[in-house]
Amino acid sequence: MTSAQTPALTLADFDYHLPDELIAQHPAAERRGSRLLHLDGKGQLHDLQFPDLAALVREHDLLVFNDTRVIKARLPGRKATGGKVEVLVERILEPDRALAHVRASKSPGPGTILRLAEAFDAQVLGRQGELFDLRFPAPVLGLLEAHGATPLPPYITHSAQAEDDSRYQTVYAREPGAVAAPTAGLHFDQAMLDQLASQGVGRAFVTLHVGAGTFQPVRVDKLAEHIMHAEWYTVPQATVDAIAQTRANGGRVIAIGTTSVRALESAAACTDGQPLAAAQGDTRLFITPGYRYRVVDALFTNFHLPQSTLLMLVSALAGVEPIRRAYAHAVAGRYRFFSYGDAMFIEPPVNNRS
């Protein structure tokens, strides 16, 4: 499933220079302690703080959050020969079976036994593309919780610590299955959620289990040739009903993070022009400039990697030039970037729904 492409755009159009020191290595002291860059519908930029979001949303708006929960998916290990391996569980297929990335000096073949976390053995059943099919001796989630580590992004240079176990998780996370956090949601604490509710701002949830593929760079110059990674999503009926009520009340659907965008727009793509309906399944939706948003009216999001699919997604909502200006402004203003960094609130210049 691929969006309409803008032929003139290439990978270079989504590049920007980011000094390493602007990549946030640790979260702010408090969840609500980040800065907020507001790109308004006139293309103007406003330097704010995260709590100012309460003044930017309106009564009857609906915030849609991704309630996926990050699992402790990273496991150190070794083969029977003594060779070191590192396993990153990508997707749980059955209670005792999962697809995983396995880093090793030599790829383990079917039947190979991996001793993981010096605690239990897993068997390699085979491969599905780049992922290894592993059989665990007990339910995967329980073993990961007991022996795994929080899978921090590759641009965070320290190993996961106790702070990361709590702060690389949203306060409303409830559906285990992600190996990367829906990072826009990391800014919200319960007090902020309560404040927004008291203002008449609605709240709804989708689930999209973020995969490690979210960090993969686009490696082709022509965007139409990029193969998007698959992620499992669910848009429940309660959220469909909340969106319908929001529309009836004249409110906006505001996605909290690009993962919420992908879930909502993937569900909309399944309806073939009909009203939004509950949906679930794998999505490979690739949103690039030229895409017409069907559900999402505005977006709260973190700053994204150069040449990434997520930078293309926000450019599709706000326009390539406004996003380019916003990112240049953020770099010059020493905003903090990526998962533990600061945030943007993006209002598109026109109604971008078809």
Image: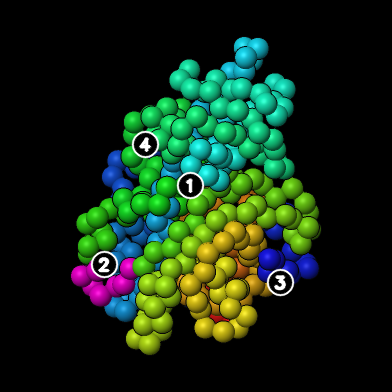
Q: Are marks 2 and 4 in contact (CB under 8 Å)?
A: no
Q: Left of 174 or right of it: where is 328?
A: right
Query: Quadrant where the C terminus lies?
Result: bottom right
Q: Of residues 274 and 305, which is closer to you in this image?
A: 274
Q: Which mark is residue 255?
A: none
CA gap, disc 1 and disc 3: 28 Å
Q: Check disc 2 and give the amino acid type.
A: Leu
Q: Earlier in the sequence, mark 4 or mark 3?
A: 3
Say which of marks 1 and 3 sits in front: 1
Q: Which residue is mark 4?
A: 165
Q: Of residues 80 and 178, which is closer to you in this image?
A: 80
Q: Is residue 325 above or below residue 104?
A: below
Q: Earlier in the sequence, mark 2 or mark 4?
A: 4
Say which of marks 4 and 1 sits in front: 1
Say which of marks 2 and 4 sits in front: 4
Which quadrant of the view contains residue 226? bottom right
Q: Which residue is mark 1?
A: 178
Q: Which residues are magenta?
A: 196-203
Q: Which residue is mark 3?
A: 4
Q: Check disc 1 and give the amino acid type.
A: Ala
Q: Earlier in the sequence, mark 4 or mark 1?
A: 4
Q: Secondary structure at mark 1?
A: strand
Q: Check disc 4 and give the amino acid type.
A: Asp
Say which of marks 4 and 3 sits in front: 4
Which quadrant of the view contains residue 7? bottom right
Q: Which residue is mark 2?
A: 196
Say which of marks 2 and 1 sits in front: 1
The picture places residue 19, in percent across and down from the top left corner, at: 56, 40
The picture places residue 274, in percent across and down from the top left corner, at: 57, 84
Dot 4 alpha-carbon crowd within 10 angstroms: few under 14, some 14 to 19, many 20 or more: some
Q: Check disc 3 and give the amino acid type.
A: Ala
